[in-house]
Amino acid sequence: MNQATVTVVVPTYEEFASLPSLIESIEKVRCDSLPNLDLIIVDDNSQDGTEQLITSLHKDWIKLIVRTQDKGLSPSVVAGLHSAVGEYCVVMDADGSHPASAIPAMIHALQEGADFAVGSRYVKGGSTEDGWGVLRWLNSKIATVMARPFTRVLDPMSGFIALSKSTFVQAKELNPVGYKIGLELIVKCQCQNVIEVPIHFSTRQLGESKLTLSVQWQYLQHVIRLLRHTKPALVSFWSFAMVGLSGAGLYLLLLMATSALFTSTPLAIGLAVWLTMTWNFIWDRKYAFWNSRERSIGTQYIGFVLVCSVGVLVNFFVTLSLSKSESMPFAGLIGVSIGSTIGIIFNFLMTRLCVFRK
């Protein structure tokens, strides 16, 4: 019998109907394999009878935490892990999709040297219950591909995970969003040796699924946050380039509008250039230089204009020169292409070092 101390963390919201069978399955593991196991249920103030249920059980190895602020699965898991007293921590869903019987194997993997254990549907021996549907299967596969920059784990989206408490406390800048706390912990705890333990993933029997478009959007935001954490310079440059590309398209549209509104060609070009530069500044500040927004926006805008002035002037004069013999959209396309080519590397480096420095 394994004498390891283990804390199982279960985040819940309106999972009252699922809890009795879940607790029964965890208690069986406790009796059969892990006598020093305790359970923390972290409930987001469901007010569905969960508190009364836990009180009525009179089990001293079960603790209930009711949260009324900063609700969400990932923050609940983090709160539970902070409260965990076991040497090892396990996180699992309350809806019956994760088999408690796999907990001993996950703890064994950690004891054998793994940094992190994942209850996996996609390794040999793992499976998923029929009835998922094509869209849910496709969603899972796309999400897994999106996680590839961070881990080669086959099922990084699994919410059934285990790690030592000492590994958790080493995590830096935990900033989870949405439902995929496992990927956050793998990255932020710098887990290299991740072991996947095969499980049978069951379809929820009671309650409603929480897999919504909002959850998928949160996952995309989460991936972006993790990319910023692991590869900040690369993300910054590509965001800068993408904003510049959008600005080039906007510039051509503005040129057509301003040239139709004003008879003065220099005024039409200059207004389009200024509006495009302002557009680029707004989105560069939000996406390319996300970690430098605490400084004065006015100071940053002036610095941005000055830094970009080389490429802007080239764009202006090329467009003005070609507009005498070519159509305005064609002149603008050549102007913005040359200006962007000349300015992109210079602008990025100078903007990063001088305007949006930390």
Image: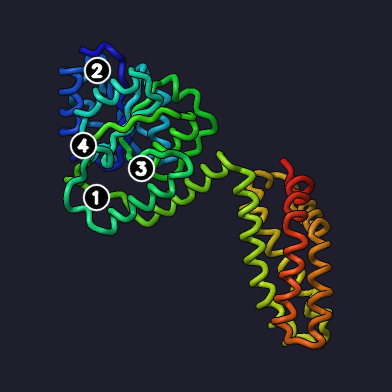
Mark closer to the chain start, 3 or 1: 3
Mark closer to the chain start, 4 or 3: 4
Mark closer to the chain start, 3 or 2: 2
Residue 340 drawn at (x, y percent): 73, 64
Q: Which mark is residue 208?
A: 1
Q: Which mark is residue 60?
A: 2
Residue 332 drawn at (x, y percent): 73, 77
**CA distance separating discs 3 and 1:** 19 Å
Q: Quadrant of residue 279?
A: bottom right
Helix, strand or loop status at disc 4: loop
Residue placed at 28% from the left, 24% from the top? 39
Q: Which amino acid type is shown beneath numbered disc 4?
A: Gly
In the rendered image, which residue does mark 4 sit on? 125
Comparing marks 3 and 1, which lies closer to the viewer? 3
* Between 125 and 173, the one nearer to me in the picture: 125
Mark closer to the chain start, 2 or 1: 2
| Cβ atoms under marks 4 and 3 closer than 8 Å | no
Q: Which amino acid type is shown beneath numbered disc 2?
A: Asp
